[in-house]
Image (cartoon, helix red, strand yellow):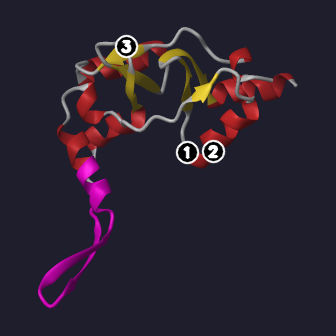
Amino acid sequence: MKVKDIMQTNVITINTETQIKEIAKTLVENNISGVFVVDSSNILVGVVSEGDLLHKETNPRAPGAFGLLGAIIYYSGVKQYESDLKKLIALKASEIMTPKIIEISQDAEIEEAASLMINKKIKRLPVMENGKIIGVVTRRDVIKTLMQD
């Protein structure tokens, strides 16, 4: 079975200037856990998830470090700390979104979508054609298909 057989075609998107409160409202009102971000040309540039919004309410994760001769040496997590800080002060989608998007083709097999979701630890994949979003496939879509077999 192909992704096009199970994808949802009514994809909800927001633009890069959408304010944080409006993003939260969009997620709640549409009962979704994430929303894709498009630029003024309707090109996919990122995704904002519930997890991204939760960063607004938490302290940044401190990077692992140790002291050596009076200096602090970071051995892990500096980039994550910087990302957490940016999300903490974010006011709009472009500042809080995750810019790296893993996408899939409508002609891909469902198994490929499931594998991407597991290996990349993501919950939704935009289905792309000619650089535009034509659908979305979620973990729930894949699970529903398994139930029908």
- The quarter of the picture where the C terminus appears is top right
- Residue 132 lies, in percent from the top left, at 48, 16
> In the picture provided, is 43 more to the left or to the right than 2?
left
Badge 1: residue crowd in 10 Å (few <14, some 14–19, many ≥20): few
Q: Is residue 128 above or below residue 113?
A: above
Can you tell which mark lies on residue 118?
Answer: 2
| Part of the protein shown in magenta | 61-83
Q: Quadrant of residue 105?
A: top right
Q: Which amino acid is tagged 2? A: Ile
- Residue 82 lies, in percent from the top left, at 24, 53
> In the picture provided, is 110 more to the left or to the right than 79?
right
* Between 91 and 41, the one nearer to me in the picture: 41
Which residue ends up furthest to the right in the rendered image?
A: 149
Badge 3: residue crowd in 10 Å (few <14, some 14–19, many ≥20): some
Badge 2: residue crowd in 10 Å (few <14, some 14–19, many ≥20): few
- Residue 56 lies, in percent from the top left, at 26, 39
State the SS at label 3.
loop
- Asked if one can make out residue 61 in the rendered structure from this viewpoint, the answer is no
The residue sitting at 37% across, 37% down in the picture is 98
Which residue ends up furthest to the front in the rendered image?
A: 130
What residue is disc 1 on?
Answer: 121
Query: Pointers 1 and 2 in contact (CB under 8 A)?
Result: yes
Q: Disc 3 or disc 1, which is closer to the eye?
A: 3
User: Is residue 73 found inside the magenta-colored segment of the image?
Assistant: yes
Q: Quadrant of residue 34?
A: top left
Q: Is residue 3 above or below residue 42?
A: below
- Residue 28 lies, in percent from the top left, at 42, 19
| Label 3 or label 2, whichever comes before in sequence order | 3
Whole-number angstrom distance, CA of label 1 to CA of label 2: 5 Å
What residue is disc 3 on?
Answer: 42
Q: Disc 3 or disc 2, which is closer to the eye?
A: 3
